[in-house]
Structures are given as C-alpha cells and as structure tokens.
Image (cartoon, rainbow, N blue to C red):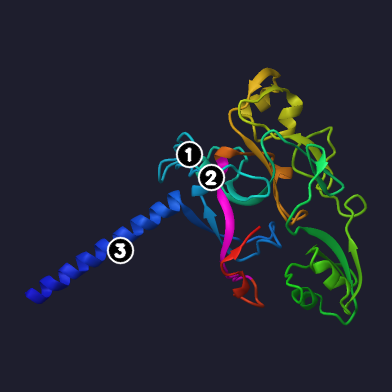
Amino acid sequence: MKKNRYIKLKIKEWAKAILYALAILFLVQQFIYNRLHITHSQMSPNISNGDYLLINKWNIGTRLPNSLIGTNFSLPTLRLPFGSEINRFDIIAFNSPIDSTQPINQKPIYISRIIGLPGDTVQIQNGNILVNQTIINEPFDTKHPYIINFHPDANPAQVLRSVGEYELYGPYKKHQYRAYLSARQVPLIKNSKWVSKLELIDWKKGIEAYTAINCKHCNWNLDNFGPIEVYRQDQIINLNSKILEIHPNLFSSSRREKKADVSNFKINQDYYFVLGDNRHNAIDSRYFGLVPKSHIIGRIKTVLFNYDKANPYKSVKWNRTLKSLK
C-alpha cells in the first residue's frame, strides 16, 4: 500500500511539473518569444530556407491576443505599454495585411525588412531604393536575378551548390538557367570554369514582373515602383479613388466599393513599407501594400538553427546555429 501511495504521489508531482512547464512555455510564446520555421527564400541570403527564427515580441511591446482562443471572434488590438521603436532595416514578423474576415493573429505570418517608416515616401527607380527622394545604402546582402549560361558538360545544380545556392530555374534555352544571386555569389559564379556567361536580368527587356497593386495609371513593376507615401498615426489625408487603388488593403471594403472621396480622413495607426531581401522573388509591400503596426508580431534578430527537410544535399547547416542577423 505504501509503495502504491508513493508511486501515486510521484505521478502527481511529475504531472504538476509538466503542467507548470507547459504553462510557462505558453506564456513565453504568447508574450515574449516565439519560434518560426522558414520554408521560402524571400529573405535570402540573410535568412535561409529551413531556418528556425526567434521572434522577439517583448522589445517592441507585446501584442495581446486579437481573438478568443478557438474562435473567429476578434478582439481590439492592444500592446503592452513598453518597447523600443521599430527602426529602418529591422527584420519583422507580421500577419498578412490582406483584407479578410479572420482575426489579425489568425492570418498567415510573413517576414520582411522595414524600409519605409511612418511619414516616409518610398520609391524604387531602376532597382535603387529611395526614401524621401534620397537613395539609401542597404547595409546587408540582397539578391537579384541573373541568366546563367553553362558549358555543355557542366552540372548547373552542383555549380550553384558550390556557392551556397540551391534554387535554380530552367533550362529556358540550351544550357541557360535563371538564379537569384547575392553580391558575394556573383563573382564566384562569373569566374567559374563551368560558366560561359552571366547576365543581370533587365525586367524591361526580359521577364516582366508586375506588382499586384491595382493602380491603373502607375505602370509599376518590381524595379520601378512608387512613389508611395507611408502613413503615420493621426495623419490627415484626402481619401480618393487613386489612393484606394494604390492601397487596396488599407481601407475598408465598403469604401473601396463606393469609391467615395473623403476629405480630412484621419489615419488611425502607423504603417510601414517592407521589402524582401531576395528582391525579385519576394512577396512584400509591392504586392500587398503597407503593413499596419497592429499586424506586426515582433523583431527577428536570431537564427536558432537550420534544418531543411526539403534540401536533399545537406539537412543541417551548423554554421547558422544561433546566428545573429543584420
């Protein structure tokens, strides 16, 4: 009997310990940190397919849950009253700003880099990023699309793997492929004995890459976009049909349908313009418009580790364990 009582006591103790641990883990994930697994390349080369990222919710002011657990019932968006300002070039995790009936925290999660802050005007001219009419120098690697002509006896996938690149498109013509390369990778590929020609794609001459923003008079594409104003809280604007076209997800569907002009419309929160580092293979503000602050989950500064099940060549990249991002 004493033995059975002892076993039951130990089981209760372990059950309590497990429940406490789960409760602490739940609170940490809800209010401080969360983990995100990346299965795309839109932030490559700085964030790789297979990375497990640490989202810091605390340092911008934790956003409280926007819905009741297990329901679609939306709650007001509130943040804890502390945290630092969001800065240009921060990498953020955010919920999709595309209009839907879902509560904010149940929408898909994207990651991108902050380029335009509230009050800025952002423009892209021939691939150069201008903020408030000044070209900005981005202190991180970005990727751009290239056409690569390989020698007949080359193994294109193996050549790309030798410089740390795993995505290859084609062939489009005999021995001709397309890849997205960073500034570090370009000279390595260009000087490879297996490559006969490397050429940066000019979207005006080659593949067209239109944005999803339905601005009939803009004729924008990925390399030539804007200018677009990034709204700040309490800003007064003249809401008209052109603004509704440029910002398809910012205003309510009823206003879009009516196409009504509204003078002295007051913006209710700060907005941000974001871009992916893999500039021509990313879904960002060129497609879904500005990101409201209410949709931002937190900053991303750390890669926990990398494990990519889809990569048949190397499942674990040890050099990305606890890697700091810039």
Secondary structure, mark 1, is: loop
Residue occupied by mark 1 = 79
CB atoms of marks 2 and 1 within 8 Å: yes
Residue occupied by mark 2 = 60
Amino acid identity at mark 3: Ile
Is residue 262 toward the left or the right of residue 145 in the image?
A: left
Q: Which residues are magenta?
A: 295-310
Secondary structure, mark 3, is: helix
Amino acid identity at mark 2: Ile
Q: Is residue 23 magenta?
A: no
* Residue at screen point 84% across, 32% down: 217
Relative vertical location of residue 267 with respect to residue 299 in this rendering, above or below: above
Marks 2 and 1 sit apart, C-alpha to C-alpha, by: 9 Å
Residue occupied by mark 3 = 18
Marks 3 and 2 sit apart, C-alpha to C-alpha, by: 30 Å
Residue 58: image x %, image y %? Answer: 49, 48
Q: Is residue 296 magenta?
A: yes
The residue mark sitting in front, 1 or 3, is 1
Residue 21: image x %, image y %? Answer: 33, 61
Query: Which is more N-terminal, label 3 or label 1?
Result: 3
Label 3, residues with CA under 10 Å away: few <14, some 14-19, many ≥20 = few
Secondary structure, mark 2, is: helix
Could you say which is closer to the camera, residue 107 or residue 182? Answer: 182
Amino acid identity at mark 1: Arg
